Amino acid sequence: MLEIVALGGLGEFGMNMLALTWSDTTVVVDAGVMFPDPELLGVDRIIPDLSYLQKRRAAALVLTHGHEDHIGAVPHVLSLVDGPVYGTPLTLAMVEPKLEEHGIDGRELIAVKPRDRVTVGPFEIEFIRVTHSVPDCVALAIHTPAGIVVHTGDFKIDQTPLDGEHFDVHRFAQLGSEGVLALFADSTNIDRRGVTGSEREVIDAFEEVFTSAPGKLIVAAFASRGNSTARSRSSDAAWCAIPRLPSASGTSASRQGCRFAIRRSATIRRRTFCACRPAHKANRCPRCRASRLTITVT
Ligand SMILES: [Zn+2]
């Protein structure tokens, strides 16, 4: 019998965590935190109730994306997971500092890419590209002995994603044709009609604000808005105005050479992308005189 239990994230904002069990194998999808309301003074984070896992433990932890409400509880859950942690390179890169912070090492973190499949006991877990407000997100098609369970993770269908990684509608259509036992689909505002704009739409607003600022700019951002944060950093005007911009996601910025590195052990990709007009791209930023605008993820 297939048993699916939401350990958090249903009817609440945060603590996303789902357990799937067949026979004696349990797989957990995501392990997020909830941020407390102001009246919970002294409480930094709230994690899901883990008593279900204390009874049966998990064979693997599978992560859909790097938002805190999906990975924030990973360090607290790992002691109840006997197998590896699967996630995309960026998601794992966001998990690694959390493990370091909690003194956890030696855990097997396995990087996956869309269309990969991994087998965990009776489950075959397939990763499917989805777009969201942070890059490198995946949905899951979990092939179980009872049928296919589709877990979308968080998503926003962005038809012009900044990283060119498109929502894999074709695979979702194929799965629909094959037949899906259960669909778990939830994301912010999913119950509202209409369409959310592309992350790309913020570029013009950033450019306008940055180029018209008479002096120093202070940027406040919701840390997990990864696409927007990267875009604000890649603006040449932002570099001129903000020599150093720390980030909750562990990135660091240096104005020197108009270049910054997201300090990670795993190579994700190397790419030059900036919000400058084409004339700036290959040579020098005319505002700060630095050469090249490069984002290196190493
Ligand atoms: Zn999310």
Image (spheres, helix red, strand yellow):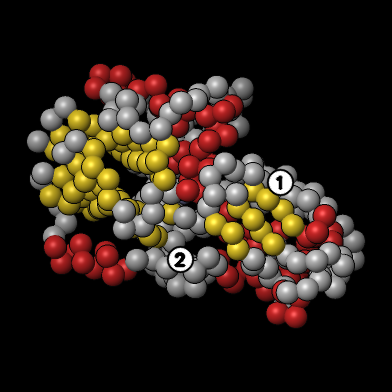
The residue beneath circle 1 is 252
Q: In this figure, which residue is indicated by the disc labeled 2?
A: 165
In the rendered view, does 174 fall on the left or right side of 91?
left
Residue type of the residue flagged with mark 2: Glu
Which residue shows up at 47% across the image and 55% down it? 136
- Residue 182 in the figure: left or right of residue 96: left
Foreground residue, 199 or 58?
Answer: 58
- Which residue is found at the position 28% from the left and 23% from the top? 57
Q: Measured from the top left, where is residue 144 in percent x and y?
A: 15, 45
Tell me: residue 155, above or below residue 46: below
User: In the depicted view, which residue is nearer to us: 149 or 90?
Assistant: 90
Q: Residues within 10 Å of mark 2 (few under 14, many from 20)?
A: some
Residue 11 vertical placement versus 195 (above, below):
above
| Image coords of residue 37 (percent x, y) | 56, 34
Q: Amino acid at mark 1?
A: Ser
- Please state which of residues 157 and 36 is positioned toward the viewer in this rendering: 157
Q: CA distance from mark 2 to mark 1?
A: 24 Å
Q: Is residue 212 visible?
A: no
